[in-house]
Amino acid sequence: MKLTAADEQLLSVLRENARASTAQIARRLDLSRTTVQSRIERLEREGVISGYTVRVHDEYERGNIRAHIMITVHPKQMPAVVKALREMPQVRHLHSVSGGWDLVAMGVVPTVAEMDVLTDRIGAIDGVERTTSSIILSTKFER
């Protein structure tokens, strides 16, 4: 699907606050409420908008330990490894990447000890060959 400039602006507003009312979005984009509602419905129907989520306040997240966990997976075991990682709520993001690693996960836990447990759990998954972790010290910016 080809997105228009208005679609891109609408998506940008929704990324900021997906709970904004149709009227608020319409005022911000200088469009009618009906136009905004129909665009949102079309974007959902066509799969451009696949869902909505919660963003946790930065102050709360700063209290957690976050790490990038690079994972090498044995060939043909990727689906089972991805399934096992999806079942771990401490794994927030999972990316397939090129290079020396097959996957990069973002782990988020309250303490360093729990990060140690998480990386051990990931390393124990059948099909995981090895892991390497880098704890995130700070986020300079996020988009």
Image: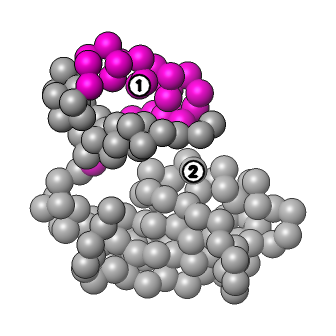
Q: Is residue 124 visible?
A: no
Q: Is residue 34 visible?
A: yes
**Residue at left offset 63%, top offset 37%:** 1
- For label 1, the residue is 40
Numbered mark located on residue 86 in the image: 2
Amino acid type of disc 1?
Ile
101 horizontally vs 30: left or right: right
Above or below: residue 49 compared with residue 79: above
Q: Earlier in the sequence, mark 2 or mark 1?
A: 1
18 horizontally vs 93: left or right: left
Identify the element where label 1 is drawn.
helix
User: Residue 49 in the image: x percent, y percent?
Assistant: 48, 34
**Residue at left offset 58%, top offset 64%:** 95
Q: Residue furthest left?
A: 59
Nearest the camera: 126 or 108? 108
Res 77 → quadrant: bottom right
Query: Crowdedness of circle 2 by 10 Å Cα count: few (<14), some, many (20+)?
Result: some
Picture mark count: 2
Nearest the camera: 14 or 99? 14
Identify the element where label 2 is drawn.
helix
Query: Crowdedness of circle 1 by 10 Å Cα count: few (<14), some, many (20+)?
Result: some
- Specify the segment rendered in magenta: 31-55
User: Residue 76 in the image: x percent, y percent?
Assistant: 86, 63
Magenta region includes residue 63: no
Above or below: residue 11 compared with residue 88: above
